[in-house]
Amino acid sequence: MKKRVFSMIMCFALMFTLLLPNTVVDVEAKNSETDNNANSTIGMSNVRLDVTKIKTTNGTTVVYDPANGLYRNPRIFSGYYVDFEVSFIGKNLASSSDIENKLMAAKYFGSFNAVDNLNKPNTDKQTDFYVTKAGEYASITVKNMRYSGVGKELVLPILQDDDSIINVSFAIPEEFFKVETSTPSRPDSERPEKPEIAVETPYVIINSYTYGEEENVTAGDKFILNLQLRNTSQNIDVTNMILTIETPDSMILTNSSNTIHIPLLQANEVISKSMKVSVKPSSEAESQKITLKMNYQYIGNDERKTFDRTEVITVPVTQIDRFELTSVEVPETNVDGEEILVTVNYVNKGRSQAFNLSTEIQGDFANPGQKKNLGNLASGATGSTDFYIRSSKPGVLTGEIVMVYEDTNAVEHEQRIQFSTNIEEKFVPEKPFPDIPLNPMPEQPKSKLPIYLMVGGAILVLVIVIVVVKKIRQKRREEEDADL
């Protein structure tokens, strides 16, 4: 309310001063060339501009404030915040509130830029406008307009009652841009040359990024990549920026170009950009790298400079888990107390390897809790493992195989498969006859003849047989010869 009263007082004061000879800065009023509704017949007269306050790049340190007797450094540099009082006489002007709303909606004002209230919530640095009217006289108080470092004019879009726009250009006095030099204590020829200090380079960084609510994305899916870009400089704006996104072969940008144009990124400003990305089903289950290349311009030492930066972000990709316990092999019927062979079969149908497989058998039998470590299983591979168990009682024996493994992102998974078998009692046959004692066979009397006599007798008999056989054969041959 105080600001409104002050502005009205200023407006009436200006009406009085306009009756005096015009000694103010030469200011030019221009019609908008871009608004088709602009009325070129409407002109502005008695246009006046006063610089009322200058603050440094931090937006708080005041170096020029004539209302409070401060004239320490009436100079405007890139990134400085400037307050103005402007006034003019115009016809067919819109209402004060409509003019004010139109100014608040704009962002660029010739050589000055409005401070983004969303990204800079500090009220001491927000750009603001206060408009008062008295008939055809208008007065505008401009707060915290930020100098871009290019040009020396303030341009305000003034709304007319027919919704047309007149862009009024106010030239800033040259004295606010002159650099004073002290009187040398010795001739210029003897003064050492001071090297010109280069202006700081504004760095644009990826302040943060997201790719969804999950910790990773799944191969074959789509996700929204959100980027937050920040200008780390406190006083230098970045302009004409080209952001190029280079994705790996496993990813494709969907419905968007891989280049984004950013006209202006103010000092310490943060902006967000998003794009849709598709992941190929054949993508490797690993962290995929996305390269972000930035090319932009800025004003340094009164000249436009170009700078390039590259940043890399990573997006973890995981494959669909397709590991399966396919079957358990166990005999349908078993005998109580005997060992039972249980075989479990498994397969990895996924596109990535399964790591650190371990399995355990559980159930209502005599030896549960057996465990085995099976190592890794490649994509498309199969495997099996055996357990030996013993029943604890007749009836139906039930059990379960538990398999634990890790995916490529070290996330642990668990699968279970159940089995059962019938346990029969062990068969013990009854005895068909009562126990009858058996008479032992009488032992044969042992021969008292020495063994060497027995062997000698056998040899003698053999010799006699051989001699007799030879004589018989000889006699037969003699008889045969006599017949011939």
Image (cartoon, rainbow, N blue to C red):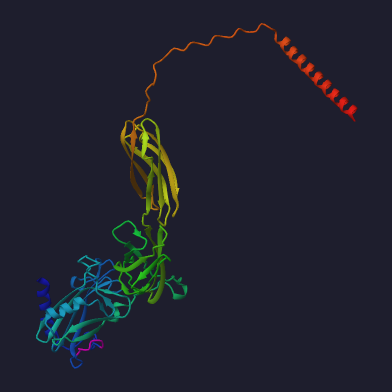
The x and y percentages for residue 257 are: 36, 74
The x and y percentages for residue 102 are: 18, 79
The N terminus - image quarter? bottom left
Count of number-bearing discs: 0
The x and y percentages for residue 295 are: 39, 72
Quarter occupied by residue 30:
bottom left
**Viewed as shown, does residue 104 lie left or right of 403?**
left
The C terminus - image quarter? top right
**Viewed as shown, does residue 173 lie left or right of 322?**
left
Nearest the eye: 244 or 367: 367
Asked if one can make out residue 45 in the rendered structure from this viewpoint, the answer is yes
Q: Is residue 35 magenta?
A: yes
Q: Is residue 345 magenta?
A: no
Nearest the eye: 17 or 341: 341
Q: Is residue 159 above or below residue 373?
A: below
- Magenta highlight: main SS: loop
List the single residue furthest toward the bottom: 41
- The residue positioned 27% from the left and 77% from the top of the image is 112
The x and y percentages for residue 43 are: 18, 91
- The residue positioned 56% from the left and 9% from the top of the image is 443
List the single residue furthest toward the front: 483
Asked if one can make out residue 242 in the rendered structure from this viewpoint, the answer is no
**Viewed as shown, does residue 330 lie left or right of 109?**
right
- The residue positioned 37% from the left and 28% from the top of the image is 427
Q: Is residue 275 above or below residue 49?
A: above
List the single residue furthest toward the top: 448
- Magenta-highlighted residues: 33-38
Quarter occupied by residue 431:
top left
Nearest the eye: 383 or 412: 383
Nearest the eye: 226 or 115: 226
